[in-house]
Amino acid sequence: MGRIFGKDKEEEAPTPAPEPAAEEVAPGDAPAASEAAPSEAPAGTEEAPAAAASPEPIAQVDVAAILTKMEAEHPEDLDWKRSIVDLMKLVGMDSSYGARKELALELGYSQADIDSKGSAEMNMWLHKQVMKSLAENGGKVPADLLD
């Protein structure tokens, strides 16, 4: 998902700004730090929940638009809308059978189904599950890709 949604958004959210400022004040002046600490502590406490709450309302990411742009820039002709192999290649993932099998198991496909059914059926299931997961995690996915 990070390859489609972008890793920058994930990396920006957890960086707390108030903590380094509090640490810089404390070593400099012990009396000033003790006087400033009570007034800064509630502010830091108030800011922490606000910072934690702000990443939650994420604007939907247009998955189809991002993948279509990636497809235009990719050297191979890929059919990511129907092929899990092409989708994985497009986002730079290992698309080997072993990697697809591992991903399918992570997403809930059973080993029994892998053993009894063909890889084509697993691939179709896996493509739908990946699209469904993208939609559940803030992605705007066209309905025809979710069916």
Image (cartoon, rainbow, N blue to C red):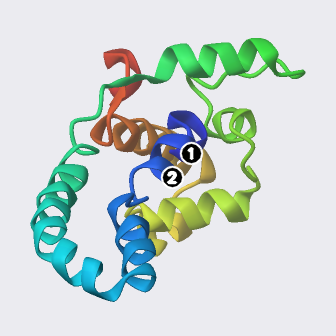
Q: Which residue is drawn at 60% across and 63% down?
A: 101
The amino acid beneath tag 1 is Lys
SS for callout 2:
helix
Where is residue 41 drawn, in percent x and y? 16, 71
Give whichever of 1, 57 is nearer the camera. Answer: 57
Residue 113 in view, yes or no: no
Q: Which quadrant would the C terminus be assigned to in this image?
A: top left
Q: How crowded is mark 1: few (under 14 residues within 10 Å), some or many (20 or more)?
A: few
Where is residue 88 drawn, in percent x and y? 67, 42
The residue labelled by disc 1 is 7
Mark 2 → mark 1, Cα distance in angstroms: 6 Å
Q: Residue at x 32, y 35 (%)?
A: 138
Tell me if residue 104 comes above or below residue 88 in the rendering. below
The amino acid beneath tag 2 is Glu
Left or right, residue 57 beside residue 20: left
Specify the quadrant of the image occupied by residue 69: top right
The residue labelled by disc 2 is 11
Specify the quadrant of the image occupied by residue 132: top left
Q: Residues within 10 Å of mark 2 (few under 14, many from 20)?
A: few
Left or right, residue 31 beside residue 91: left
SS for callout 1:
helix
Q: Which of marks 2 and 1 is in front?
A: 2
Left or right, residue 99 beside residue 116: right
Where is residue 124 drawn, in percent x and y? 50, 39
Residue 119 in view, yes or no: yes
Where is residue 2 drawn, in percent x and y? 54, 46
Specify the quadrant of the image occupied by residue 14: bottom left
Residue 74: numbered disc: none
Give whichever of 58, 41 is nearer the camera. Answer: 41
Give whichever of 92, 121 is nearer the camera. Answer: 92
The answer to whether mark 2 and mark 1 are in CB contact below 8 A is yes
Left or right, residue 147 beside residue 121: left
